[in-house]
Image (cartoon, coloured by chain):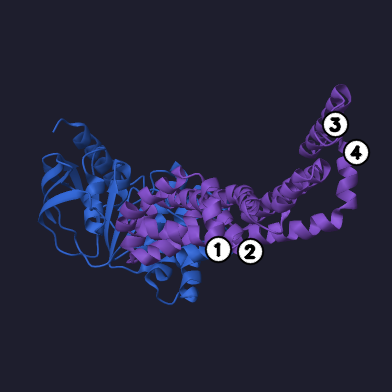
Chain colours: A purple, B blue
Amino acid sequence: MTGWRAGLAALCLTLALWQAVVWATGVARFILPPPALVARTLWDSRLLLAEHAAITMAEVLIGLALGAALGFVTAIALVASPMARALVRPMLVFSQAIPVFALAPILTLWLGFGLWSKITMALIIIYFPVVSSFFDALMRTNRDWIGMARVMGATPARIMWHIRVPAALPGFASGLRLAAVYAPIGAIIGEWVGASKGLGYLMLLANGRAKTDLMFAALIVLAVLTLLLHAAVNRICERTLDRPDAG
Amino acid sequence: MAGSASIKGTPIFSNLDLTLEPHSWTCLLGASGVGKSTVLRLLAGIAEDVEFTGAQSDPGRVALLAQNDLLLPWLSVLDNVLVGARLRGTPPDTGRAHDTLAQVGLSDHAFKRPSALSGGQRQRVALARTLMEDCAVVLLDEPFSALDALTRAQMQELTAKLLANRTVLLVTHDPAEAARLGQTILIMTASGLIKVATPSSPIPRPFHDESVLRAQADLFDQLRSPQ
């Protein structure tokens, strides 16, 4: 409950500060709209916002699912094969040195203006954190468990599936939590570069037409959806992947 | 098993000559760092980092019970007992697992998680898991040293009863434990194994038995004497 109250208090403080800045500076609406105007726009444009939010969330969720699945498989492959580790890990690190923003135009060129360039963008942005945290957890498996399994006559594949993967699921969960926050960023970048739908597209459009209130409204919707997604992923991870008693 | 071992060039032991008496308990006693656990890992076939020169007859499939119970926290007690079958990809014998849990007195706990059990109960689950392996040779690596004195005594008796007539190698640093459970007692030193006179009564021997107490005292002296 204290968490809720603190959050609510922080929200009120933010709104008050925002309103205070608007009053104090007398800034034009198209530079900084007052909170009340943004709230009205949120309500008046709810259908428009919902339509674009649905597109963005679809991109995010598909990107998240694909990125998580691909990351899961990659991490296992990297752990299972020293050869793959030697070849792929430098590539992974190198790929992180390329700013994803720079890739967006190329992806749009290759995959078109539709959903797939945004899904791929979200996938790319979450792939590394998922692989990295799951891989690290897989490499940290208790050696004694592995020794015990080998004494029992287990093959490496069975050790992987019955010991290492379940033991590393909390690590996979921490990757997923990061991914839930990063995936919307990827989708929005994709939409900025070239789209005809989605919250990112709506933001650019509103900005270009000096409808700053609508831009703020879209931004708020995006932030709330991201928080909800993170909370949902967190809940799912707590129920299925985390083990407070893991030893 | 006879030979010398080293890890990354550091000698662990040399000129060791160890033979396990079939269907009997052999206790390997020694100070920390003398290489007892290395012997055990070599016998278990999980000592890649050890360079061993010498001869070792294959003991076949062995079962291992260590100080750490190594229960998997995400599996129930029953599934932990069945983990060997799961790891080998053979059909699990749930009926026998329940029977084995009954033997160690944990029938009521089959569907609990290991985290809900006490240290002694966890070690009994590990014992049940070891029994499920049903191997002729069982390696015990200080399995009771993390338990409190009372629980340790109970576990020693239970383990001796359930592993009677198997070929057991018990690695321990506790002279009292060796005196209670060893049918052959060997002290491991840097220069090799010393065979020690052992009470002839059946195991587990009672604590207050005079021969056990004397054996314990003798073992203490031998361990403390400069070698």
Label for residue A111?
A: 1
Q: Quadrant of residue A1?
A: top right
Residue at 33% across, 57% down? A84
- Tag 1: residue type? Leu
Counting from the top left corner in percent of width and height, residue A22 is at 86, 28
Residue A80 in view: yes
Q: Are marks 4 and 1 on the same chain?
A: yes
Measured in 3D between alpha carbons, the distance from the residue under mark 2 to the one under mark 1, in whole angstroms, is 8 Å
- Is residue B96 rendered to the left or right of residue A214? left
- Tag 4: residue type? Ala
Q: Are marks 2 and 1 on the same chain?
A: yes
Chain that bears disc 1: A
Q: Which residue is mark 4?
A: A36
- Tag 2: residue type? Gly
- Is residue B125 rendered to the left or right of residue B219? right
Sooner in the amino-acid sequence: mark 1 or mark 3: 3
Specify few, some or many for label 3: CA neighbours under 10 Å numbering under 14, 14-19, or 20 or more: few
Q: Which residue is mark 2?
A: A114
Counting from the top left corner in percent of width and height, residue A92 is at 41, 50
Say what secondary structure mark 2 lies in. Answer: loop
Q: Are marks 1 and 3 on the same chain?
A: yes
Query: Where is A152 relative to A239, above or below?
Result: below
Q: Which residue is mark 3?
A: A28
Nearest to viewer (mark 3 / mark 2): 3
Say what secondary structure mark 1 lies in. Answer: helix
Quadrant location of the C terminus of chain B in the rendered image: top left
